[in-house]
Image (tube, grey):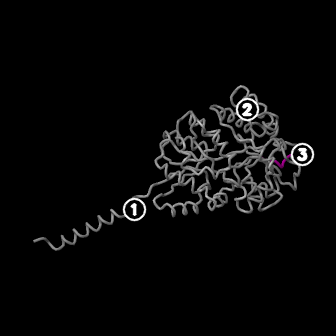
Amino acid sequence: MKHPGLKYLSGGLIAAALAIASAPSHAETLRLLTWGSYAPQQVIDLFEKKYPDIDVQVTFSNNEDMIAKLRATGGAGYDLVQPSHDRVYGAQEQFNIYKPMDLSKIDTSVFEPKLLDAVKANTTIDGKVYAVPDQWGTSGLLVNKAKAPDAKRWGDLCDAKYKGHTSMRLKRTILLGMAFDMGMDPFALYSDKTKYQDMLDKVTAKLIACKTIVKTYWKGGDDLAALMLSGEVYISDSWDSTAYKLYSQNHDIVFVPPETGALAWIDTFALPRRGEADDAAYKWINFVLQPDIVPMMSAASGAAIAVKNGISMMPADKRAAAQAAFTQKDLDNLKFFANIPPGIEELEGKALDKINAASSQ
């Protein structure tokens, strides 16, 4: 005769087995490698509510770090990354870290055509597209119009009449902007390192001479905001998103697209070559481009989303700042960053080191 407890145990095991069989499968993880503020928690929560079988895991990064991480693993470790549109082609050619996008799985009709075309032009290899746009913005001038009403050129950062009241960030953007201001097109020189170095030498000399004018070199957006709001600095190079945030606090502080054209970047979506959750990645892309999600994304980053009428979908304060900054002529004059060939950033790094080390006397 069987022990009565065995019947109970057997029934319990059966019940447990049935419960396991009927439970949903273990959630899939979408490993997102992106910029700070590009994956706000509010949006993640809404996404996971819509797709309860997907967990979003976010790692914040930047262009150089994204490439380094994917290069080290051969494109493994992440399922969706967000490099800028000029950092995809070269990295793929050198390191083979991405896989082509399946555009049939993305609602490309929502994109601003000019931005989609720009990304396609920069990220198409052997007829295959390796990225689509997400957020975009520009670099140009941040100006206190009450103090410097006529400022409109990169060169104004080095104008003696603003001595002690200008600032800049010693990164490649200032090299490129000043080159355009001096009548050179750095992107057209990318293919010839000798000519590019000659351009860098001229820009370097200009920026070393400029050190007697510059009050300080800012490192982050908070540094720059403090300098502008205090009135210490009248003009600086800046991302437009920083200007939008400050405009709500002081309407005299505006973004000014330089007359040679603001430098335009587009941060993209790209699939790592050995990513393991492509379907989840496509779901995230389509989700964050929806009309009800776009304002949340824009509010978090301060940038415009690369959808049709993206500026009009920004939060009211940032929309007002963007509309105060750009005319249609300015938008037509954008200088989109070009693909960076191997070796160019090394040359730029040496130029920046030389400027940084030079005496300001």
Q: Report whether 167 appears left or right of 52.
A: right
Q: Can residue 264 be seen in this view?
A: yes
Identify the element where label 3 is drawn: helix
Say which mark, if any, is on residue 161: 3
Question: Neighbour class for label 3 at 10 Å: few (<14), some, many (≥20)?
Answer: few
Question: Disc 1 marks which residue?
Answer: 24
Coordinates of residue 194 in the picture (x, y in percent): 71, 25
Residue at (68%, 46%) from the top-left corner?
Answer: 115
Q: Residue furthest bottom?
A: 4
Residue at (70%, 36%) from the top-left corner?
Answer: 353
Residue at (77%, 62%) from the top-left corner?
Answer: 249
Identify the element where label 1 is drawn: loop
Q: Nearer the viewer, residue 243 or 223?
A: 243
How far is disc 1 from disc 3 in space, using C-alphas?
68 Å
Coordinates of residue 342 in the picture (x, y in percent): 62, 32
Coordinates of residue 101 in the picture (x, y in percent): 54, 44
Amino acid type of the residue tagged 1 in the rendering: Pro
Coordinates of residue 298 in the picture (x, y in percent): 66, 57
Say which mark, if any, is on residue 273: none
Q: Which residue lies furthest to the left in this view?
A: 1
How far is disc 3 from disc 2 in space, using C-alphas?
32 Å
Quadrant for the C terminus, please.
Answer: top right
Residue 20 drawn above or below residue 75 = below
Bounds of the magenta span?
A: 163-167
Question: Neighbour class for label 1 at 10 Å: few (<14), some, many (≥20)?
Answer: few
Q: Nearer the viewer, residue 204 or 345?
A: 345
Question: Disc 2 marks which residue?
Answer: 188
